[in-house]
Amino acid sequence: MTTTRSPSSRVLFSDLAFLAGYFLLFLFLEQLLRLLLLFRNSDLATAAPAPDLIQSFVVGARFDLIVASIMALPLVIGLLFPQGLGKRVWARLWLGITGSIVLFLGVTEPEFYHEFHTRLNSLAIQYLKEDPATVTSMIWYGFPVLRYLLLWAVLSAFYWWGLKRLDRLTRKMAPYPRWWIRVPVFLVVLFLVAWGARGTLRQGPPLRWGDAFHSQDLFANHLALNGAWSLWKAAFSKSKKQVGKKWLNVMPQDEALQLTRDLLLTPSDTLLLPDQYPVLRRHQPAAPLTRVPKNLVFIIMESFSAQFVGALGNDHGITPSFDRLAKEGLLFDHFFSNGTHTHQGMFATVACFPNLPGFEYLMQEPEGQHQFSGLPVLLKSRGYQDVYVYNGDFAWDNQKGFFRNQGMSNFIGRYEIENPVFMDPTWGASDQDMFDQALKEIGRLDHDWPFFAVLQTLSNHTPYALPDPLPVEPVTGFGHLDEHLTAQRYADWALGHFFEEARKQPWYEDTLFVLVGDHAFGVRKQASEIDFLRFHVPLLLIAPGIRERYGSINHVTATQMDVVPTAMSLLGQPFAHQCWGRDLLSLPDGDPGFGIIKPSGSDHTVALLWGEKLLVKPPTGRLVAGHYQLYPEPGYREDDEMAEKNELRRKLYAYISTAMRALLENRTGVPEEFR
């Protein structure tokens, strides 16, 4: 005798079959998007072992399952209803809309990752919050938007068709079973979907981003993540500031303070008001130059990666102007940005404060209203005139508000540039227009008084809108980087044109020029857990007699934190400051140099560079120690047995903890009596 399921049981199981089919369909499409991400960034995958890339798809399915399970939860609850999912109109509508949104995010990710070397995170949110019109324009002109929209439409249409097809294949028309059948089935399905939403059966925390890190290759690890999941975590996780404040408790306050002072104070420093300020000190510069500079010009170059600078051994013909200038000045070849976004590069280089976890966009935060120990504070009290020339909009990143609060008064942006050769609808005028305007603005100053100028370029930024015709030959042979490197070559040309004209000015011989990249960009090789090549930028100091006094190249490891104290030192007078870097020209013999670096966005990874040693602290998981090299070829070797690992950990923790406390307690500036 055979038994058959009742019609009511069959209709319940038909709803379960529909749910199971939805999961398979959604996971299939997510894996297709992961394959697209791999294809678009295939150059980054060349160093990853094939088994690791395969494992990325296996691990990635667990993150995809989390998203699929969260989307399915309303349908699971529907199993309790007397009619179950009914005609499934609302079920298909819910899954269709939410699934299309997730697919849209997946379609945007290949280009986002290509640009930032990270999955979708708070950086995407920050961009949209900053200026939606500008960001929309940048995306429209910088990326193949229509192609990706078409792809999204195709994937969404297939997804909606698949849901409808599943509905037809699994539909059974009969009364739904009684509650004593529905409830046990609901509980079993709820458990399974809840397990899927956790991504793991282990006790304790659900699946975390650290679980994706199964490989020694950074791209393979990132490939395993899910962009919708990472964006969700960034948007709805704990306040970034609260995460950052955890650093206050990583070690006793007094111990952290003393270690930080040991890091930052040199034999040329005298601590001031030690009970009130953490690192306030008076600095006595080394022997001055034969001709002490009167003026100071900071030139901050957008996305000026050291990996394509000829003077640093990477002679691809991208930076001939910079290379010529390097023969006149002092070049630092182990120099790094503190972040991977212009925002961090600006407040680190000019305001001399580090890029801290939770405060990556400091210029927009309430704490950005504090006084810092940057150029405006240190020079305005000495009677220096100031001018800040930028070919973009100062409203972006709140630059004008932040630097005006720090003491700058003369801002020349895209709307003040006279007769521009080229105006990009997204960002503004070209680099050559910015430099030409800078010459005019400096010429209008009273040259009986000293001045300092900040000149910030922008053309080497997506969408790389450049003048037509170009004054340089387009770069070829670098694949997807051709357009980026053409923009870097153009920015270099504009820099060279500026110096050609500046040499003719009466103030030129009395001026110290500081040339630095705001950050680098992703290249084919992702070295180490933090991809340190994205931080590698040049620093070049040009002034009469500087090579005779300090040589042509300096190998000390340094970051943008060190720019202000080094530049101030070359002006020849003692000064009080509270910079979180050091005068690189006053370091004792044998000092390898150090720097703290951190990516942009919600990635709370931080790292300490100590000479050519590297210690990376992920948000969760173990510390990773290793040795990096920049020359003759970039490389990295992990060394978990490094003897100095624990000591480097203590230095890293102390520095961030002390800087965080100073920021939160508003003890980052220089008192009036010491200016």
Image (cartoon, rainbow, N blue to C red):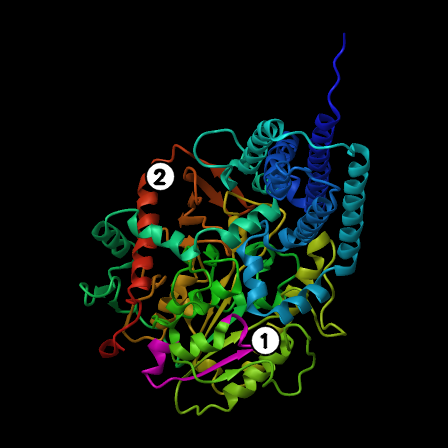
Q: In percent of the image, x 23 and y 48: which residue is there? A: 252
The correct choice, above or below, for 95 with respect to 53 in the image is: below
Which structural element holds mark 1?
loop
Which structural element holds mark 2?
helix
Q: Distance between the residues labelled 2 and 1?
A: 43 Å
Q: Earlier in the sequence, mark 2 or mark 1?
A: 1
- The reply to whether callout 2 and callout 1 are in contact (CB within 8 Å) is no
Q: Where is residue 47 in the image (x, y as percent from the top left)?
A: 63, 38
Q: Quadrant of the C terminus?
A: bottom left
Report the magenta residues as a range: 376-397
The correct choice, above or below, for 198 with respect to 41 in the image is: above
Q: In percent of the image, x 26 and y 51: which residue is there? A: 256
Question: Three-letter amino acid code at disc 2?
Answer: Lys
Horizontal side of residue 50 vs 268, given as left or right: right
Query: For the residue carrying disc 2, how many other residues have a C-alpha within 10 Å: few (<14), some (14-19), or many (20+)?
Result: some
The correct choice, above or below, for 15 with respect to 410 in the image is: above
Is residue 326 among the parts visible in the rendering?
Answer: yes
In this rendered view, identify the residue nearer to me: 586 or 621.
621
In this rendered view, identify the residue nearer to me: 511 or 41.
41
Residue wearing tag 1: 392
